[in-house]
Image (cartoon, helix red, strand yellow):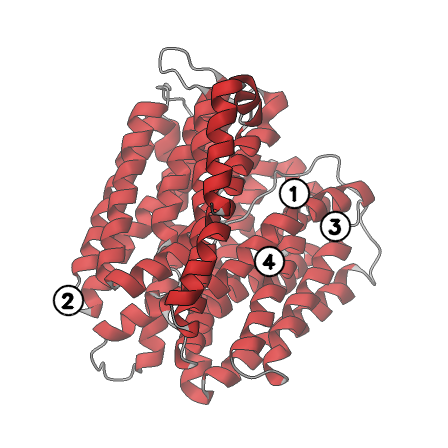
């Protein structure tokens, strides 16, 4: 009798003789996931000897790697489903826990759709490239990412206004439609111009979903539970990234790029169905604040510490994310012989490190009050780690860079947000924290837009290896400048209030 058969028999016998034990084992989502993991591992252990005797060594290695990734993805999907079931959402009663659980499920499905193409979008762009006077293939490969990020920044203020005017649920339902069309159009695109058009539609859907989800959680959670509600928002985005990047790579290997985009369209449509069935209706509200005016950015840009935070930490963080991770990593790994599935597995390291390290770093930074120290460490680690390509060319050096970027952003994401009210006390009192953060977010996204374009320009001029080094050097210089500005200058002291955690591309 194999191990798998023995374990299956034991579980079945326990369910018959002592069903209370099985119920207790799956009483919470985490316990239920652990139970599923144990069953799957037992099954794998039981079938491993047979596989080793049948499959060649190289095929077995690929099977085990893909199988391990799919196991992690499956467990995360089960966990998300169990969280939704545990909250027992009911449309007739808008309970806070039910509403937030429904929003998490909706957001997870939508972000999963976007993350499926993360490991191969530049490669798909190259397939559609036709010569354009004055624009090289390398530059055009980075254009869809840069355009997407630019349009997200442009659409975000409008998405907030729509959510205030029409209600978050209705806005989310309407906002998913451009994304469904965008993914479907991307799958059918016959030229780079068509690809850019359909990715623009995806950017509109992304901006509406991102802001609409935040507004929905703010409306449907009591003030004392607002931070926990936003933590659900952040978790949905991160878990979607963990699942989507490797899963999309595997699908692209097996079925092709276009079919994977079609799967994204179906997931975005599923998000619309989830919004319609899981979210309670909410009424439109008139905005209580006037929002921000572009002229107010002048006052913030006159604050030297705000400018230092923006230029030496926040913008470089976004630049490294989109330029290094989203653009250079897929292109470099593909050139090194990795398939989309392999690229997805390696990029998964980034999200895993943030999930494991991020909460610990946030708690420690809040406990010590040294947010600037943690942000500075993050910048230096990210820059130094990406320079590992100098010592370990090829896949090992890139993997070290991905891991270092995960550590850096685990240190940066929450601490940067906490620093904003610390360095902008007067501006927060005059404009309000919401307006200060709106300006900050808008300016910060400049790094997301510039990242792939700068990386593509460097790769076009000097090669991808030199571009990886150049971004590492830039990260080191910015981290050093940030430390000089914040750690050598007198600190402003802890702020009385800090912003919620979370970050997005």
Above or below 54: residue 130: below
Q: Determine the CA span between mark 4 and mark 2.
A: 37 Å
Residue 447 pos. (x, y %)? 51, 62
Above or below 214: residue 389: below
Q: Determine the CA span between mark 1 and mark 2.
A: 49 Å
Q: Residue furthest front?
A: 1
Q: Quadrant of residue 473?
A: bottom right
The residue that label 4 is drawn on is: 314
The residue that label 1 is drawn on is: 427
Above or below 100: residue 496: below
Tag 1's secondary structure?
Answer: helix
Q: Determine the CA span between mark 3 and mark 4.
A: 13 Å
Q: Is residue 168 left or right of 198 when viewed as pictured?
A: right
Local packing at callout 4 (Cα closer than 10 Å; few below 14, some 14-19, many 20+) is many
Identify the residue shown where x is 25% and y is 64%: 256
Mark in the foreground, 1 or 4:
4
Local packing at callout 1 (Cα closer than 10 Å; few below 14, some 14-19, many 20+) is some
Q: Are marks 1 and 2 in contact (CB under 8 Å)?
A: no
Mark in the foreground, 1 or 3:
3
Tag 3's secondary structure?
Answer: helix
Above or below 130: residue 199: above
The residue that label 3 is drawn on is: 371
Q: Determine the CA span between mark 1 and mark 3.
A: 19 Å
**Is residue 204 something that shows in the picture?**
yes
The residue that label 2 is drawn on is: 190
Identify the residue shown where x is 60% and y is 22%: 223
Q: Determine the CA span between mark 1 and mark 4.
A: 18 Å
Q: Are marks 1 and 3 in contact (CB under 8 Å)?
A: no
Q: Residue furthest top?
A: 92
Numbered tag placed on residue 301 in the rendering: none
């Amino acid at each position: 009798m194999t191990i798998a058969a023995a374990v299956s028999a034991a579980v079945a016998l326990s369910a018959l003789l002592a069903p209370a034990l099985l119920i207790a084992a799956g009483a919470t989502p985490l316990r239920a996931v652990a139970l599923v993991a144990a069953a799957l591992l037992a099954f794998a252990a039981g079938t491993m000897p047979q596989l080793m005797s049948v499959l060649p060594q190289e095929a077995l290695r690929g099977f085990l790697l893909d199988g391990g990734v799919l196991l992690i993805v499956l467990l995360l999907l089960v966990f998300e489903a169990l969280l939704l079931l545990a909250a027992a959402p009911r449309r007739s009663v808008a309970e806070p826990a039910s509403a937030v659980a429904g929003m998490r499920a909706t957001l997870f499905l939508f972000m999963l759709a976007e993350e499926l193409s993360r490991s191969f979008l530049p490669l798909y762009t190259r397939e559609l490239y036709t010569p354009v006077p004055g624009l090289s293939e390398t530059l055009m490969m980075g254009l869809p990412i840069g355009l997407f990020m630019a349009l997200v920044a442009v659409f975000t203020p409008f998405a907030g206004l729509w959510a205030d005017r029409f209600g978050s649920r209705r806005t989310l339902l309407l906002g998913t439609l451009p994304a469904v069309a965008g993914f479907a159009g991307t799958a059918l695109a016959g030229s780079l111009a068509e690809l850019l058009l359909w990715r623009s539609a995806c950017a509109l859907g992304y901006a509406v979903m991102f802001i609409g989800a935040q507004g929905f959680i703010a409306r449907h959670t009591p003030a004392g539970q607002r931070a926990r509600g936003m933590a659900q928002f952040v978790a949905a985005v991160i878990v979607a990234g963990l699942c989507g990047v490797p899963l999309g790579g595997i699908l692209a290997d097996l079925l092709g790029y276009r079919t994977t985009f079609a799967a994204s369209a179906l997931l975005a449509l599923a998000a619309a169905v989830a919004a319609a069935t899981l979210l309670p209706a909410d009424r439109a509200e008139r905005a209580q604040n006037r929002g921000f005016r572009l002229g107010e950015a002048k006052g913030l840009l006159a604050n030297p510490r705000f400018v230092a935070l923006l230029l030496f930490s926040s913008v470089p963080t976004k630049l490294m994310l989109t330029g290094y991770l989203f653009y250079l990593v897929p292109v470099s790994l593909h050139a090194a012989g990795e398939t989309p599935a392999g690229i997805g597995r390696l990029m998964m390291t980034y999200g895993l490190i943030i999930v494991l390290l991020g909460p610990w770093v946030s708690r420690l930074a809040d406990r010590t009050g040294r947010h600037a120290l943690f942000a500075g460490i993050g910048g230096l680690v990210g820059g130094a780690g990406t320079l590992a390509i100098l010592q370990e060319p090829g896949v090992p050096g890139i993997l070290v860079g991905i891991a270092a970027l995960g550590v850096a952003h685990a240190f940066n994401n929450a601490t940067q947000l906490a620093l904003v009210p610390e360095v902008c006390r007067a501006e927060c009192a005059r404009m309000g924290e919401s307006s200060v953060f709106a300006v900050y977010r808008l300016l910060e996204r400049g790094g997301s837009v510039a990242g792939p374009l700068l990386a593509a320009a460097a790769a076009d001029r000097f090669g991808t290896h030199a571009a990886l080094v150049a971004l590492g050097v830039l990260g080191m210089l910015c981290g050093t400048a940030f430390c000089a500005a914040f750690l050598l200058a007198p600190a402003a002291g802890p702020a009385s209030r800090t912003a919620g955690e979370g970050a997005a591309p």
